[in-house]
Image (cartoon, grey):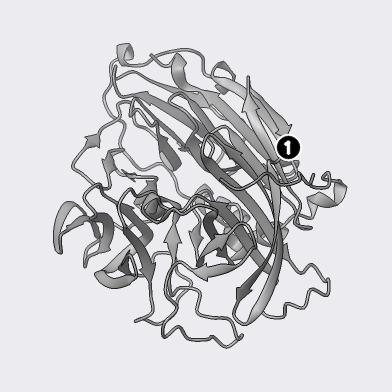
Amino acid sequence: MHSEQETVRAPKNTTSAKKNMLTIVLAVVAVAAVTAAFWLYRNPPQTQSDKSNTKIGESIDSVLVTRKITAIPFMATDLPTVFYTADAAGNVLYYELANGEYVQIEPTGTMELSVPLSGQQIPVKIPYIERDGVLTGFGLFTSDGADTGVYIYNFVMFKVCNLPSAYSADGKCLLLAYTDQTRAYTMDPVWEEAYVLNRSNGTTERFLSENNRTLGITGAVRSDFCMVTDTALHTETPMVPFLSARGRDQSDDENAAMDIYVKNGDKETLAAQNAIGRYVKPLENGGFAFMRKTEGGFETVKSENGTQTVISSFYSGFGTACIRSGDWILSKEDGRVHSTYDTRVYTPTGYKINPLVFSVSPDEKYIVMAGTVLNALDYQVYIYNIETGKYATFNEPNYAAHSNMRFIDNTTVTYYVLNVDGFENVVLDVSKVK
């Protein structure tokens, strides 16, 4: 455990925080919302008995815990009830969700680092929280017109966290980074860089190899060379799968096919090809599951001991007719929710929605979806109790696109909605659907 550091309080957000780091990508979010608005409900209604529906009120207020408007959305950390915000000046604040309220909390300490990337030294301050053996912290570098001495990048998001257990070492942690500012408010980031950070002196060494990595036209190293996700890092074995397009043309398409390599100690080997969705899940035996592009759609695949086995096949497009949340894939045509790494499938009843986001509770008791029904203004939240087969549908007065829907425990769901007043952070209690 690292020795205690002096706690450095990040400056309070001011009105200038409204010019936050995502101002430049609001247009992207708006386009997504407009696109969703023109997708009309096409699924034929399923025949359901009224007894299947848990009627607890048409208004979402009956399951609402809180709505809070902020200039910057609350973003998840590796501690389920702890969130962070980051503004354009690089100020990071932490909040704990307790009793339906976001309460600001002080960081355990702050790391001041100079991180080597593409021949530049990127300065960043990372306030962090350390609790119950979990380290989590975020920092943002942005030039914002200032003379930082960094000429290749104007945005880099950083994260510090525990190393995978097989690589843990006293006084060291993992330092992650990505440079795609359009992904700043995603709950499922793909990290372009990974370092082992020595906490005592701030020095770094590469966690993933850079051998044969090429430069782009801007002078930056290729960003899709060794991409790793938070999911892939949650492994108990030395086998850490990561994504790479090093053998392909560089593409900004998130659904473009990539290859999967596996880090095993000092060795990195090619393990699978044509992976899509920038997703790979480690398995207990050192294998992994992923999604692979096919001629008519895609399939989920399990790779174990060099052998690949198809789990499920989908004859529709990923990202359009099928969407992913965590380790689950939702087929929008029939509402079925498929596990990415085994053959479990849940079929919700009363499914009459075009879901744009969804989430499954950790105990697999609840499925929550949000999206349009009859038209763009008919936005609803649908909650299904897997154990009892009961469901409830709620009118959502805010019909802008919902983002970052996730469970923070077995019954509490969070998401945010971008509207004219800012980011509306919503918390729901789904336990009332019994």
Residue at mark 1: 106
Q: Quadrant of residue 353?
A: top left
Q: In which quarter of the image is residue 391?
A: top left
Q: Is residue 347 left or right of residue 235?
A: left
* Residue visible at 52% across and 70% down in the picture: 205
> What is the quadrant of the C terminus in the image?
top left
Badge 1 element = loop
Q: Residues within 10 Å of mark 1 (few under 14, many from 20)?
A: some
The foreground one among 405 and 133 is 133
Q: Is residue 61 above or below residue 31?
A: above
- Residue 129 in the image: x percent, y percent? 63, 41
> Can residue 153 be spotted in the picture?
no
> Can residue 364 be spotted in the picture?
yes
- Residue 424 in the image: x percent, y percent? 67, 37
> What is the quadrant of the N terminus in the image?
top right
* Total numbered labels placed on residues in the image: 1
Task: Looking at this view, name the residue that lies furthest to the right.
Answer: 15
The foreground one among 393 and 304 is 304
Q: Is residue 415 left or right of residue 109?
A: left
Q: In this view, does 123 lie above or below 31?
A: below
Kind of residue sitting beneath label 1:
Glu
Q: Is residue 405 left or right of residue 31?
A: left
- Residue 74 in the image: x percent, y percent? 65, 41
* Residue visible at 73% across and 37% down in the picture: 106
The foreground one among 100 and 118 is 118
* Residue visible at 38% across and 72% down in the picture: 244
* Residue visible at 79% across and 50% down in the picture: 18
